[in-house]
Image (cartoon, grey):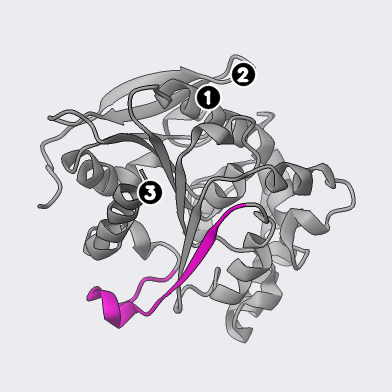
């Protein structure tokens, strides 16, 4: 069964803990739901990118919610100049989505992409998630990347973005790598990517490791061998912080999934449907 492309989402707002209203989209099922599902997106990637997957999941029995973290997509203010936001705020936005979707009647699952894998360990209500399937999680450090990609990333971090960000936000759209970012998010991202184990190596963020150690939900972490930003070695450097979860690591060989290259973004493009089948099959096993 393929996704029902006629399934238009219900556009809603979710209120975060500090009162910020976050734009979300709810894809309802046409039958009794097997479960509820939240898509935790990547840094600077608007929720519309995940609509194909959300339609697929809802057509297979999972009421699915996507969201734009504050500062991007439909949650972006009229200007990012002076707009205050951090990755911690984004995790709070995701926590609000968990509260909205949690139910005593069916299990709640989460699918993450890149930053979504970081945010899961920051959630104060992670215990409400029955299972977490994440694509492209990694530590973000240039040393885990192939040489040419590492050189390019360091040039962007150290030369290009510091110059462009003087306007008060990070204009990522000019570089073709996602939406523009609030300055606080950009600062944290750049800082934590300078460490081999991301924020776990930051002496000013020691409490984060303690939060991750409290997570007990089972996790599948799937990374493509052609994802230069999040190769399996980068995943392994980060994922071990979920030390009290049952973790299954999957290395994806693109040709094995019949959709050519995957890279860092291909996990959620329409040709990646075989990967989506794996996700929903795993949910059925653990629920």
Picture coordinates of residue 174, whole percent (x, y): 51, 55
**In-front residue for pair 182/118:** 118
Residue 286 disc label: 3
- Residue 107 image position (x, y, % from top left): 38, 33
Splitting the image into 4 quarters, where does residue 39 fall?
Answer: top left
Q: How many marks?
A: 3
Q: Nearer the viewer, residue 9 or 111?
A: 111
- Is 33 placed above or below 139 here? above
Identified at 15% across, 34% down, the residue is 7
Magenta part of the chain:
245-263
Residue at 50 percent of width and 50 percent of height: 42
Q: Are marks 1 and 2 in contact (CB under 8 Å)?
A: yes
Mark 3–mark 1 Cα distance, whole angstroms, equals 24 Å
Q: Which mark is residue 179?
A: none
Q: Is residue 287 left or right of residue 18?
A: left
Residue at 55% in and 29% down: 95
Give left or right: position of 174 versus 124: left
| Picture coordinates of residue 48, whole percent (x, y) | 33, 41
Q: Which residue is mark 1?
A: 96
Disc 2 marks which residue? Answer: 17
Q: Is residue 169 visible?
A: no
């Amino acid at each position: 069964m393929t996704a029902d492309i006629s399934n238009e989402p219900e556009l809603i707002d979710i209120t975060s803990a500090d009162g910020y209203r976050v734009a979300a989209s709810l894809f309802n099922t046409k039958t009794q739901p097997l479960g509820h599902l939240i898509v935790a997106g990547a840094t600077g990637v608007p929720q519309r990118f995940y609509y194909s997957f959300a339609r697929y999941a809802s057509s297979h029995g999972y009421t699915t919610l996507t969201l734009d973290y504050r500062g991007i997509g439909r949650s972006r203010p009229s200007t990012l100049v002076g707009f205050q936001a951090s990755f911690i705020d984004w995790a709070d936005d995701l926590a609000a989505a968990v509260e909205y979707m949690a139910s005593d009647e069916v299990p709640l699952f989460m699918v993450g992409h890149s930053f979504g894998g970081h945010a899961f360990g920051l959630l104060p209500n992670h215990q409400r998630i029955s299972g977490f399937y994440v694509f492209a999680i990694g530590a973000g450090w240039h040393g885990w990347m192939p040489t040419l990609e590492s050189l390019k990333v360091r040039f962007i971090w150290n030369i290009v973005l510091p110059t462009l960000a003087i306007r008060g936000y990070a204009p990522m759209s000019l570089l073709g790598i996602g939406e523009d970012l609030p300055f606080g998010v950009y600062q944290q991202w750049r800082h934590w990517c300078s460490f081999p184990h991301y924020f776990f190596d930051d002496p000013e963020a020691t409490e984060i490791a303690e939060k991750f150690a409290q997570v007990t939900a089972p996790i599948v972490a799937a990374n493509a061998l052609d994802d230069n930003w999040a190769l399996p070695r980068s995943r392994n450097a980060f994922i071990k912080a979920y030390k009290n979860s049952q973790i299954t690591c999957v290395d994806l060989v693109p040709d094995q999934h019949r959709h050519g290259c995957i890279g860092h973004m291909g996990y959620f493009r329409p040709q990646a449907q075989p990967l989506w089948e794996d996700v929903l099959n795993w949910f059925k096993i653990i629920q």
